[in-house]
């Protein structure tokens, strides 16, 4: 009895003392290591690998330290809570929590926390700036939904479906007048296991912000979702919408998971209007989004249009306005924003269409024209590459692609994609389809960027014969024409003769690695084969380190020998060129890597009995290097 009453007070205090001692110990060890590191910082050559290991160790220590802090905080807090509860009990009996209805008829919990609630998921991206005032059970519920969807469904369920959005258009767009005689529009929303409130908000925004006489239909494509609430309950919502807007909403359900490209194609097939807009389900269209699209397509039905996306934050659902940009891609065919072409600025009209090499997924087009040029490549799996394929195809086959500054769609960028942990697998395969069908001799760039051998890649990219036929039938232009006329920012590297990881025969477990970033000292590191270890040797002598950028205004990194000190140095290639650095190397498969100017060799050494190799520049001792893949006959005759 006595013990029982005293425990809550004494036990946490003892634990607190124990943890406090531990924190002091961990901080001490950390301090010692950092001190040692400072003392040794003169011996650069020894640091590379050792410092990587130290970093890992320090990170561990920091985590332990953080854990102790959390536990002590928890104990302090629970001690506070126990004391506060006791005090509160004396003051007043607990009241029931008032709950108020939200826009969706749900019930919002309005409990006000008694003490600042403990953050249960301090490392979760969801709680970085949102959710500080949630009670613990609410935090758990929100976190669980976040993990499932990659965005804040807890909040979405509590926001109005018809919430207002900041008008993000350039001011001149507001003064534009559009013809009353515009083409009609089918809007397609594709989804796989999205949250119901997200889909309903997308539908609501489309109904509220599209002229009803132009909006022919909204077609939902369910790519075989497993969430129960997207079955019967969603049908009920559709019926409710259709009571007010007869025949407006339709739903098509896939009988198996087909991926987003086929979902978009299914939407196109089911559509009837003059123009189709194919959107993700986690969007909200903004004011007058449709009119600029419809009027531009009325002028020219061969143009594929992208609205400008603004970003709905996955955590607090705030809208961030994005600057207008063109849509491009790199040689791995990942999408990225490109600067707007000069001639657009010369027009001095913020509302003018921006000529764009590609699109980013969300698109609008004349339904018949899109069909004529082959909609999308149905042979693509799950995710990636389909938008770049459409961009290239549209241009090469007689169309064009434009971004319209006056058409704004707010798109929710997820924190993670719940349906695919590693996007690169599908992406890589789909990229090879694009390369094989559309890119002619430039296709090798895609293989280089993904570090895939040019022959016998081992990747089954499926049957591309019908897409090749399509290209022939439409009499499409070459990729060379596309690069020169549409996307000069994409720079081909025609002199690459070897690419991939680079190993020394003294120890083939280690590869040349770009080393810590920021930093410019390459190191030897356990081979993992990701882009920090991708190197590109050119017949002209340059050796790129750490992946392939290869677009105008982005800089590849070149290996150089300063001629001073023992370490090789990585420099931005353009800088190295400008400063006349020693950036050219002689290399043949299975032989030394020799700097053409300094005549020193890139070699590996073990220092002071260290078990690890350090990458150095020194007088040549005939060490041998191999690069993973070679191009055509280069290096094969050795
Ligand atoms: N989607 C789909 N099937 C899939 C994967 C995704 O229908 O196998 C849908 C998804 O629900 C979303 C759209 O495709 O509406 C685009 O996917 P996501 O938003 O993940 O791509 P992102 O916009 O991030 O590139
Ligand atoms: Mn999306």
Image (spheres, helix red, strand yellow):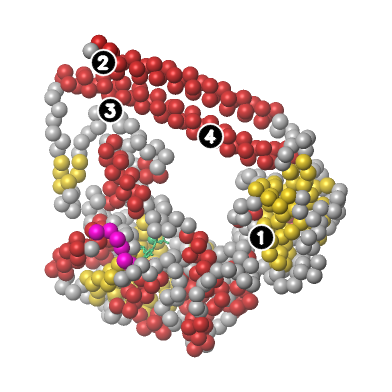
Q: Residues within 10 Å of mark 4 (few under 14, many from 20)?
A: few
Q: CA distance from mark 1 to mark 4?
A: 32 Å
- The answer to whether residue 355 shows anywhere in this view is no
Image position of 378 (left or right of 90): right
- Which residue is label 4 attached to? 60
Q: Quadrant of ligand 2?
A: bottom left
Helix, strand or loop for disc 4: helix
Helix, strand or loop for disc 1: strand
Magenta range = 223-228
Q: CA distance from mark 3 to mark 4?
A: 31 Å
| Vertical relation: 85 (above or below) 63 | above
- Which residue is label 3 attached to? 115
Classify the position of the C terminus by image quarter: bottom right
In this rendered view, identify the residue nearer to me: 226 or 562: 226
Answer whether residue 128 is magenta in the image.
no
Q: State yes or no: Cβ of the residue under disc 2 lies below 8 Å from any atom of ligand 1.
A: no
- Which residue is label 1 attached to? 500
- Which residue is label 2 attached to? 4
| Dot 2 or dot 1, earlier in sequence | 2
Q: CA distance from mark 2 to mark 3?
A: 25 Å
Residue 294 - label: none
- The quadrant holding residue 2 is top left
| Vertical relation: 499 (above or below) 101 | below
| Dot 2 or dot 3, earlier in sequence | 2
Residue 254 lies, in percent from the top left, at 31, 71
């Amino acid at each position: 009895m006595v013990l029982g009453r005293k425990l809550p007070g004494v036990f946490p205090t003892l634990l607190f003392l124990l943890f406090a001692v531990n924190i002091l110990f961990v901080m001490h060890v950390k301090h010692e290591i950092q001190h040692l590191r400072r003392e040794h910082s003169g011996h650069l050559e020894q640091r590379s690998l050792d410092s990587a290991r130290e970093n890992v160790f320090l990170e561990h220590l920091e985590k332990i330290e953080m854990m102790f802090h959390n536990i002590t905080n928890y104990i302090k807090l629970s001690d506070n809570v126990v004391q506060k509860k006791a005090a509160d009990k004396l003051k007043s009996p607990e009241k029931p929590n008032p709950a108020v209805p939200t826009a969706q008829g749900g019930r919002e919990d309005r409990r006000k926390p008694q003490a600042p609630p403990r953050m249960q998921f301090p490392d979760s991206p969801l709680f970085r700036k949102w959710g500080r005032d949630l009670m613990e059970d609410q935090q758990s519920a929100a976190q669980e939904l976040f993990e499932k969807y990659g965005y804040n469904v807890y909040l979405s369920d509590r926001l109005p479906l018809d919430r207002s959005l900041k008008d993000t258009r350039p001011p001149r767009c507001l003064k534009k007048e559009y013809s009353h005689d515009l083409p009609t529009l089918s809007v397609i929303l594709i989804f796989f296991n999205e949250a119901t409130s997200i889909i309903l908000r997308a539908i609501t925004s489309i109904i509220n912000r599209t002229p009803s006489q132009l909006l022919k239909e909204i077609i939902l494509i369910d790519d075989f979702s497993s969430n129960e609430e997207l079955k019967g309950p969603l049908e009920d919502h559709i019926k409710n919408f259709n009571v007010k807007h007869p025949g407006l909403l339709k739903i098509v359900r896939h009988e198996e998971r087909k991926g987003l490209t086929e979902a978009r194609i299914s939407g196109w097939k089911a559509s009837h209007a003059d123009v189709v807009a194919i959107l993700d389900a986690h969007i909200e269209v903004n004011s007058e989004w449709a009119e600029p699209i419809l009027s531009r397509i009325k002028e020219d039905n061969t143009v594929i249009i992208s609205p400008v996306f603004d970003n709905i934050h996955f955590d607090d659902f705030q809208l961030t306005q994005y600057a207008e940009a063109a849509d491009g891609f790199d040689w791995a065919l990942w999408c990225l924003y490109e600067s707007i072409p000069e001639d657009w600025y010369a027009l001095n009209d913020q509302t003018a269409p921006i000529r764009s090499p590609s699109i980013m997924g969300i698109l609008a087009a004349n339904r018949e024209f899109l069909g004529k040029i082959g909609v999308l490549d149905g042979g693509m799996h799950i995710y990636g590459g389909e938008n770049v394929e459409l961009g290239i195809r549209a241009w090469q086959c007689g169309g064009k692609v434009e971004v319209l500054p006056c058409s704004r769609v707010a798109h929710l960028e997820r924190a993670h994609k719940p349906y695919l942990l590693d996007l690169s697998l599908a992406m890589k395969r789909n990229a090879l389809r694009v390369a094989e069908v559309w890119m002619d001799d430039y296709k090798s760039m895609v293989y280089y960027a993904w570090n895939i051998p040019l022959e016998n890649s081992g990747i089954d990219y499926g049957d591309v014969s019908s897409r090749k036929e399509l290209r022939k039938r439409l009499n499409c232009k070459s990729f060379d024409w596309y690069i020169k006329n549409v996307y000069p920012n994409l720079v081909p590297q025609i002199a690459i003769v070897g690419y991939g990881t680079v190993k020394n025969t003294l120890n083939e477990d280690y590869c040349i690695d770009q080393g810590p970033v920021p930093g410019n000292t390459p190191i030897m590191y356990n081979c993992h084969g990701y882009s920090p270890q991708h190197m590109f040797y050119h017949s002209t002598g340059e050796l790129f380190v750490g992946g392939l950028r290869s677009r105008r205004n982005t800089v590849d990194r070149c290996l150089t020998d300063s001629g001073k000190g023992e370490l090789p140095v990585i420099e931005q290639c353009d800088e190295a060129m400008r400063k006349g650095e020693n950036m050219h190397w002689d290399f043949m498969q299975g032989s030394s890597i020799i700097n053409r100017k300094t005549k020193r060799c890139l070699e590996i050494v073990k220092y002071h009995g260290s078990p690890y190799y350090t990458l150095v520049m020194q007088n040549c001792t005939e060490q041998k290097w191999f690069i993973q893949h070679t191009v055509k006959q280069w290096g094969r005759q050795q």
